[in-house]
Image: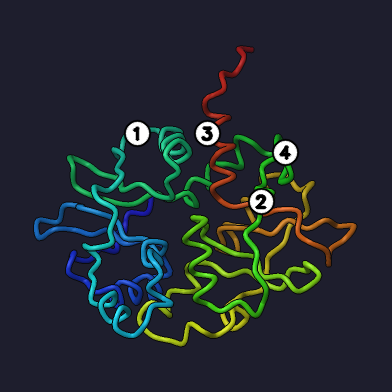
Amino acid sequence: MRPSLITCPPGTTLGQAADLLARHAIHALVISDPAGLAIGVLSDMDLLAGEWLSADPATLAAKRAQTAGDLMTSPPATIDGDAPAAEAADRMRRDRLHRLVVTELDRPVGIIAVSDLVHDLAPDTANRQTVEQAMSRGLIVCRETTPISGAARAMRERRSRSMVVVDAHGRPLGVVTGFDLLPFCDHGDVSQPVSVVMHPPITIQPTAPLREAAEMMLRLRVHRLLVLDPAAPDGMPLGLISTADIVVEMASHASTPRSAG
């Protein structure tokens, strides 16, 4: 787990919460009460809830008056600090969670996310699975001219943390994540095209072992890699592999009994 918690009170405005997420380069905040107990979690995806990015001025003003306590997920999903890492991976896979608040005697002491569990992947599954076997083949895509508000709405409706930006021929141009949209939660022109916020895709070949994918994610501090066909690198991507996909493999390996001897 990461022992340093970034917390805020429930009265924190959404703009302040977005600023904390962006400043600390994290995907979620722990919402705590005056006694220091965790009462909820606010993620970057929670900030995209509803259609407030594309709302009319009056509705937008009302939405911006909301607080972290209004949008947080409560109670937070927690796990005891003494629990095995495999249990955390299984919980995340089963309940489709991106993170768990780690507690000791009911008090939050850290947070463990999908990306943290990737650290344990290489020793256990090196060369046993390939990117192609674990990747997600269904992609959420948009054109480079799609407005930021449209991308935010599509990500919310499909519960996706990212979108692949392609041109008219399906050639990948970039990737947009919820983190990229955080600056627009409190200000900014959301009618601008996603091309102004997208970042170049980081790619990997489908035959690469999962260990290589995990090492790339850790080294480059990214949560997803675009999988390209080496025979057609300018064609439509084959899929996307994320830290969540790798955790699924971790959980399956952890739950499979190993033969003696």
Mark 4 highlights which residue?
127
Q: Quick check: 93 above or below 25? A: above
User: What kind of residue is marked 4?
Assistant: Asn
C-alpha span from label 1 to label 3: 14 Å
Residue with the mark numbered 1: 83
Q: Amino acid at mark 1?
A: Ala
Cβ atoms under marks 4 and 2 closer than 8 Å = no
Q: Which residue is at a point 43% across and 69% down the rendered structure image?
A: 25
Q: Secondary structure at mark 3?
A: helix
Q: Is the residue under label 3 in contact with that under label 4 (CB below 8 Å)? A: no
Q: Position of residue 26 (x, y in %)?
A: 41, 65
Residue 34 sits in which quadrant?
Answer: bottom left
Label 4 vs 3, first from the N-terminus: 4
The residue singled out by tag 3 in the image is 251
Pointer 4 or 2: first along the chain: 4
The percent coordinates of residue 32 (x first, y second) are: 19, 58
* N-terminal-most mark, 1 or 2: 1
Q: Which residue is mark 2?
A: 138
Mark 1 and mark 2 in contact? Answer it, CB < 8 Å.
Answer: no
Q: Give how far across and how far down residue 107 sits, in percent.
A: 19, 47
In the figure, is residue 22 to the left or right of 261? left
Q: Secondary structure at mark 1?
A: loop
- Side of 213 relative to 45 (left or right): right
Q: Residue furthest toward the top?
A: 260
Taking 241 as reference, is 120 above or below it? above
